[in-house]
Amino acid sequence: MCQGFHGAGEDYHRIFLYLYPNMSILTAIEHHVVSMLTKGLSTSLSYHDVNHTLDVTAQCRVIAHAEKINDPQSLAELEIASLYHDTGFLYVYENHEEKGCDLAREQLPAFGVSPEAIENICALIMATKVPQTPRNELQKIICDADLDYLGRDDFFETGERLRQELMSYKFIKDDQDWEDRQLSFLKTHQYFTRTCRDKRSREKLKFIRQLESLSNPATK
């Protein structure tokens, strides 16, 4: 896990402003988080890696646009939350959302983010904790972005990376345990935004049927 890098948020911001004076705050935060994750995440995190974070950020933008979220402050808080939502994995696996909030509160003031905005960002991060509990539109968007792959063409490829990760951390016993848990999770999961319900639900149902068929060959 990452060691000794996170506390340098203020110095990191000053360096960025010196090297890239025209860089926006959001871009500077993204560079900071991506660098932090690239340097610090365990190689055992085959699913919760930097690519997952960037995918969630990209999906937040797509869903927010489709949901007609236009307020710049809301969009900024959503983007920052998506970047920080899995930073807690630098330190812990379980309850990583709380640690991600700690990092956001520690680092974001150096980038000029207000205390009120930071608390909004932390609420967004906490909403992604499974079982997801979104309480407003922005929280629904980040929750759907976090699990967007459940209704995408890369479902099985992405799921395999998660299986490897969970096996590495001994959260699942074997392949049968994984198959049972994956099917159960897929059946209980729900998308919260109309955008994802419209775009992803049909594919997700198809994957459920495929997994059911694999678990019970007699139904083929």
Image (cartoon, rainbow, N blue to C red):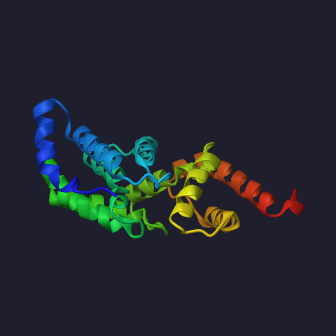
Question: Who's the residue at 16% across and 37% down the image?
Answer: 16
Position of 194 with respect to 117 (left or right) is right
Residue 42 placement: quadrant = bottom left
Question: Who's the residue at 21% across and 56% down the image?
Answer: 4
Residue 38 placement: quadrant = top left
Position of 181 with respect to 162 (left or right) is right
Looking at the figure, which quarter contains the N terminus? Answer: bottom left
Q: Position of residue 210 (x, y in %)?
A: 76, 54
Q: How many numbered callouts? A: 0
* Viewer-nearest residue: 41 or 9: 41
Residue 177 placement: quadrant = bottom right
* Viewer-nearest residue: 140 or 159: 159
Q: Position of residue 6 (x, y in %)?
A: 22, 55
Looking at the figure, which quarter contains the C terminus? Answer: bottom right
Q: Position of residue 67 (x, y in %)?
A: 44, 46
Q: Position of residue 196 (x, y in %)?
A: 54, 50
